[in-house]
Image: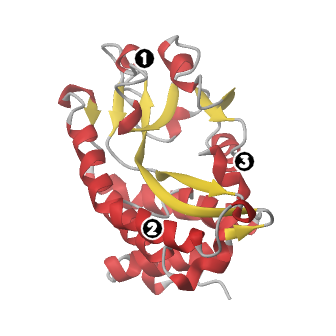
Amino acid sequence: MELTQNNLQARSLDAIGAIPDLKLAVKVMQGLASQTFSKYMVNGRYEVVGVIPVGDAYLLVNDRSINTVAKAAGKKIAVLDYDEAQKIMVQQVGAQAVSADVTNFGAKFNNHQVDIIGAPAAAFKPLELQKGLGTKGAIVNYPILQVTGNIIIRPDKFPAGFGQKSREWVAGQLPRAFTILGKMKADIPQKYWMEVPAADKPGYQKLMRESRINLTQRGVYDKRMMKLLWQFRCKQDAKNFECGLQDENYK
């Protein structure tokens, strides 16, 4: 979300492929609410006093034939104005970036101004994205990133210690958020979902990993947060191929 521009560490939670599922997202956010990370939640005059999940982001395509990265080349993809990572990734796949913001990206998809958007399940019903999908479109059932929101305050306007208390309270609400977001996905009609073949998933994971490392090297993502998320992923699945690699074990 745009508010995360105020804090690089919190913004990096949205890194492509960095948090592969909502269950891990909740664990990460609960971990970040601990006192250990409080110093990273302050940036200048602002403080992040709560990180909330908005859900897994999926690609929505207006034609099911767009079922590989190669087939996205030349297609129009809505890109949020403030998100440098999106712009770079769209360029890398050879697609055409179309400027958008959180208030109009859904309308651009529904009005056929773009062929592809990324959105969480929570956006499907309020933005009426079935209009953009029509009869030929689909939602690719493979999360590409986590959409998160930050609650941000100016700490000088609040009592001392408010930020940490708020983060801990928000963390306590995360299991409930997990249940609500899961129901939102389940409520989307099954006919709209397009599965990714199991044999293709490792390739997509590697592609997202390479993009994430590239964007970290460019300074788009925070190295400390990327290392932390790598550790979280490998704690969840120690057999994952990336756990034997050191590219994201930043010093």
Q: Earlier in the sequence, mark 1 or mark 3?
A: 3
Could you tell me the amino acid type at mark 1? Gly
Q: Position of residue 107 (x, y in %)?
A: 53, 17
* 111 to the left or right of 24: right
In the image, residue 132 lies at what x, y percent?
Answer: 42, 17
Whether label 1 touches label 3, CB < 8 Å: no
Q: On the rendered image, what quadrant is the C terminus found in?
A: bottom right
Disc 3 versus disc 2: nearer the observer: 2
In what element is the residue under mark 1?
helix
Residue furthest top as drawn = 111
Marked residue nearer the N-terminal end (2 or 1): 2
Q: Dot 3: what SS? A: helix
Residue at (61% x, 42% y) in the render: 93
The dot on residue 84 is 3
Residue furthest to the front in view is 159
> Which badge, 3 or 2, comes first in the chain's sequence?
2
For badge 2, the amino acid type reads Met
Picture layout, residue 174 above or below residue 231: above
Q: Nearer the viewer, residue 100 or 213?
A: 100
Question: Mark 2 or mark 1, which is nearer to you?
Answer: 2
Colour scheme in use = secondary structure
Residue, disc 2: 29
Residue bearing the label numbered 1: 132
Res. 121 image quadrant: top left
- Horizontally, residue 146 falls left or right of residue 173, namely right
Q: Position of residue 101 (x, y in %)?
A: 64, 30
Residue at screen point 44% across, 71% down = 168
Instruction: Decide: few, some or many residues near mark 3? Use Cα within 10 Å; few <14, some 14-19, many ≥20.
Output: few
At label 3, the amino acid type is Glu
Q: CA distance from mark 3 to mark 2?
A: 23 Å
